[in-house]
Amino acid sequence: MRQPPILSEALRLFFPLAALHGAVWPFLWVVIGGYALPFADAVPPSQWHAHEMIFGTYGMALAGFLGSAVPEWTDTKAAAGRTLVYFAGLWLPGRLIGFVGADAWSLLAGFFDLAFLLALSVLIGKAMLVRRTTKHLAFLVWLILFAAMETGVRYAWWIGDLELAARCLEAALCIFTVLFSLSAARINVVVINLALDPSGETTPYRPHPGRQHMAGAMVTLYIVAKLFFPESDVCAWLALAAGAAFFDRLAEWFIGRAAFKTEVLLLGLGNAFAGAGFLVLGAVRLGFSVTPAAGLHLLSVGALGCAIMAVFIIAGLRHTGRNLTYLPWQAHMAAALMVAAGLIRILPEFDFAASLSPHHHGLSAILWAASFGVWLQGFLPFMRAPGVDAAGACG
């Protein structure tokens, strides 16, 4: 029996699932739950919230990207059909338990989340093994480290060490930022060159390799320092270096009006939010009057929100046989909502915009959820439609 198109490759199924989780979970948490979780006791709702964003919505988005991109990069057969359904089955229990914040079931949820990430590691590792290539090995290494942080969070919750859990969550967030940096180094070249020359005949944008990879290297050093030397001021200087590296990547983005195309602008804002986030984390450590949460939310809501929405739009069109010349209105709207969610979430945490409190948490969550909801409304028909997919979407 012929399988439905939505099961033909990872991103066709996993992107809509990630968007559905991102659209529903925070909306119900804020509007229905009033920031509370019915079964959360020892674990604060704020940590449940952070975990579900990073390992829930973003985790499934990562699976969709790697599950489609790595087979494309290695020219191997992509996972499809029942395999994708099994992956979704591993991901779902953790989301149901996280939805209500069931502390008592946290270890069970962790078992499924870890199995999901390790299965994804095997999937992309197998593709590289078949081609006997280590060119994309960095993705596999960081994915395994991401799974290690999931284990760390669950263990910390189990023993009641909330400070350790917070450090593991921040490390997971930073690891995801490294994965964004690695992905962007491949995607930026393709997307910017298509923005400059939609025909694809020329490639005027050729970034310097050092600028593309310095940000990931600096974040790596920051993660190590934060995990093992959390009280050292070295963390501050490494955070500042990481922030500067992300902004340095944008120094090559002076490409005229093409920089304001939605798909290009989103990728640029992802780098800008990441740079600002690490600068704030460094400034906090050096005594500046800024809350640490501002830096973390610049990374989580701003940088990764924009980056993932950019990938949803770019890969969602390219992998369904469509080009980036004319984006559907839902792409522009989803991008605008995501940027607004990032700005509204962090501005009140700076003194000059403190008057926007205390409703910015809820408004930002609703805008973030609406961004994924609008994308889902516009792009789900593409994911379900038959047709021959276009190649080269992921770099």
Image: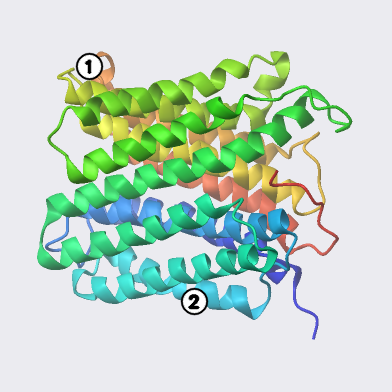
Q: Give x and y (percent) for residue 274.
A: 42, 30
Badge nearest the viewer, 2 or 1:
2
Amino acid type of the residue that numbered disc 2 sits on in the rendered structure: Gly
The front one of 133 and 61 is: 133
Q: Is residue 362 above or below residue 353?
A: below
For residue 15, which quarter of the picture? bottom right
Label number found at residue 89: 2
On the picture, is 353 further left or further right than 315? Answer: left
Q: Give x and y (percent) for residue 71.
A: 68, 61
Q: Which residue carries the number 1 mark? A: 351
Identified at 50% across, 57% down, the residue is: 140
Amino acid type of the residue that numbered disc 1 sits on in the rendered structure: Asp
Distance from disc 2 to disc 1, alpha carbons, whole Å, reads: 45 Å
N-terminal-most mark, 2 or 1: 2
The kind of secondary structure element at disc 1 is helix
Q: Is residue 140 above or below residue 294?
A: below
